[in-house]
Image (cartoon, grey):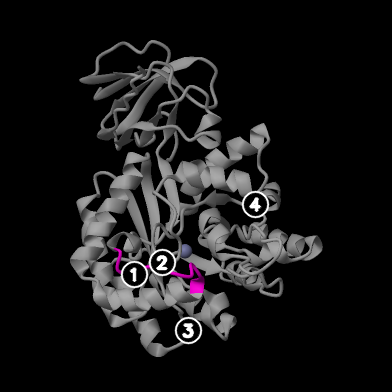
Amino acid sequence: MDWLLTNVRLPDKIGLVDIAIADGRISQIGLSIPDAAAQRWDAGGRIVLPGLVEPHVHLDKTYLNSSGHFPNRSGTLLEAIDIWRAAKKQRSLADVQTAVRRALRAAIAHGVTAMRSHVDTEEMDDLETLAAILDVREEFRHAIDLQIVALAFAGTSPIIDRIMADALALGADLVGGAPALVPDPVASLDTIFALAERTGKPIDLHIDETEDPASRTLLTLAEMTIAAGMQGQVTAGHCCSLAFMDDQEAGKVIERVAAAGISIVTLPSCNLVLMGRGMQPPPRGVTRVKELLAAGVNVSAGSDNVQDPFNPFGDYDPLRSAQLAAHTAHLTGADQLTACREMVTSRAAAALGLDGYGLRVSAPADLVVLDAFDPQEAVTAPPPRLATFKNGRLIVRTQTEQKWN
Ligand SMILES: [Zn+2]
């Protein structure tokens, strides 16, 4: 036995238990496990969750704001796009790697053990950025599982499609895109599905990030997912227009999304920043999380952009995303708060297709110790994280100290 965690509170169990870890996996969960461990930790009744899962970020853009060279003065999407184009040309690969390392350390210290990031793969230079990020992924392989989505306007030019294919060959794990933002969304989706079929890789798209209720790319995506037999292998982020449709229209789309087994990722921080500008009263802009959950759709919550021209907020804390999801979608009932916690644990793990995820015997020992005694506080008042374990290895331990005079 490598580790014995004693006096642990699990969110779905009454009373305290011990967790034994051996060979990178949870070997026992129970009362008063005999102490034969090389190392031990007395959690003192604190909450332990399975490692948090971040389903949607943009590591290639992150922390651009920190440099001070790329301020978004209007805070709008249009200016953000212009700044991003200019910044890509000015930043070195070393700058990118420094930012990615900082992001991964922040995430891991918050308890993240698996993450999915989109990376632009639209220009030849983007492949060098991707390779630099893949190198950092290797550095952190012991600490975090990192999936990369190749993101480009697929189907809009043969050059972009070739760069997408090269990115997937280089090591990107998923086919990405933003088909609602191109003139012919169906052609873009055709290209994306063809690329997925050719490479055997799953799909994760930015979908309907707009207030326009007529934007129904999500419905097309659902039908194409079913036609391609890719149920359970497709993720759709944002899906904001769903919130702007009437209930009947939205219900029809949600029914097909459920049938297609599409995982939806809500991205409340970025939606609150970018959606509904100029509208009065300003809408929240997030998708219909409550209705999607009620229809049995797998919904998770992500950070999206973090401290870059698109979104000045964020610190790679999935519990912050869970809280924002609860807040913006009116998910404040006791069971709904639990669902929001699952949106950054088990539900996000399902979106990422993580095998054997969870706090149970024989699962990989990926877990986080919270400085809290009430499981609901994970969402209602995200507490400090005291330790993150990855495959049974203590990756980071955080000590908090408070002195009262
Ligand atoms: Zn995004």
Residue 94 in percent (x, y) is at 18, 65
What residue do we see at 24% from left, 45% from top?
142
Name the residue type under label 3. Gly
Quadrant of image for the N terminus: top left
Q: Residue 289 carries which label?
A: 4
Q: How far apart are marks 3 and 1 (CA)?
A: 30 Å
Q: What residue type is labelled 2?
A: Pro
Of the numbered discs 4 and 1, the one sitting upstream in the chain is: 1
Q: Residue 360 location in percent, x, y? A: 44, 30
Question: Circle 1 sits on which residue?
Answer: 70
Dot 4 or dot 3: first in sequence order is: 3
Q: Determine contact: label 2, label 1, CB under 8 Å.
A: yes
Q: Tell me if residue 88 comes above or below residue 64 in the rendering.
A: below
Cα separation between marks 2 and 1: 7 Å
Marks 4,1: beta carbons within 8 A? no
Residue underneath mark 3: 155
The vertical placement of 365 against 272, above or below, is: above
Tell me if the residue at label 2 has its CB under 8 Å from ligand 1: no
Q: What stretch is highlighted in magenta?
A: 68-77
Q: Disc 2 designates what residue? A: 309
Q: Which of marks 3 and 1 is nearer the N terminus?
A: 1
Q: Which residue is drawn at 54% across and 50% down?
A: 300
Along the viewing direction, whichever of 311 and 373 lies nearer the viewer: 311
Type of secondary structure dominating the magenta stretch: loop
82 relative to 246, above or below: below
Image point (68%, 64%), residue name: 242
The quarter in which the C terminus is drawn is top left
Residue sitting at x 45%, y 25%: 372
